[in-house]
Amino acid sequence: KRQMKRIDFSNVNIEMELGVFQPRDVRSEFGNIVFQHAATLEQDTLARKIFNAPAGKITELADNEFDILTAAMRASGYRYSVIRDLEAADQSEKPEEVEANG
């Protein structure tokens, strides 16, 4: 079974300065980063998927989509810590029924 990353892009805890984390809505920022680096239709589609992700909802990314996103971030000069924080926002380990009750 392929593992999907499950991320709420409207609420990602990002380390803004050393040891200081703030929840950030990164949909526009990260969507635009992928869009700027889009050389394929798949990358363009992913950019729009992130940009248009509904607030407060989980967006599922396949592993290859997540790789496209992090590659674009690295190419844009994002610090490792931001990519680490994005990986930490993955909720795929959590049971899915949690969000229905929340």
Image: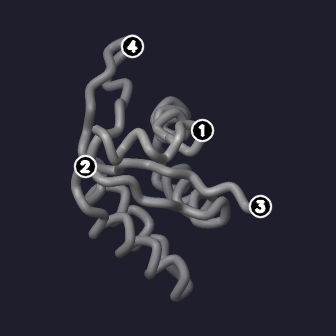
Q: Is residue 2 left or right of residue 27?
A: right
SS of the residue under disc 2:
loop
**Residue 85, above or below 41:** above
Q: Is residue 59 left or right of residue 41?
A: left
Q: Quadrant of the N terminus?
A: bottom right
Which residue corresponds to the image point at 38% horizontal and 53% vertical from the top-left?
58
Which residue corresponds to the image point at 53% horizontal and 61% vertical from the top-left?
61
* Earlier sequence position, callout 4 versus callout 3: 3
Disc 4 designates what residue?
18
Can you name the residue that lies furthest to the bottom here? Answer: 41
Foreground mark, 2 or 4, reads 2
Residue 40, percent from left and from top: 56, 85
Label 4 to label 1: alpha-carbon separation? 27 Å
Which residue corresponds to the image point at 52% horizontal and 88% vertical from the top-left?
41
**Residue 4, above or below 22:** below
SS of the residue under disc 4:
loop
Label 2 to label 4: alpha-carbon separation? 26 Å
Q: Within 10 angstroms of label 2, few (less than 14), some, or many (20 or more) residues?
A: few
Nearest the camera: 11 or 95?
A: 95
SS of the residue under disc 1:
loop
* Earlier sequence position, callout 2 versus callout 3: 3
Foreground mark, 4 or 3, reads 3
Disc 1 designates what residue?
93
Q: What amino acid type should be assigned to the residue bearing mark 1?
A: Glu
Label 1 to label 2: alpha-carbon separation? 18 Å
* Earlier sequence position, callout 1 versus callout 2: 2
Disc 2 designates what residue?
56
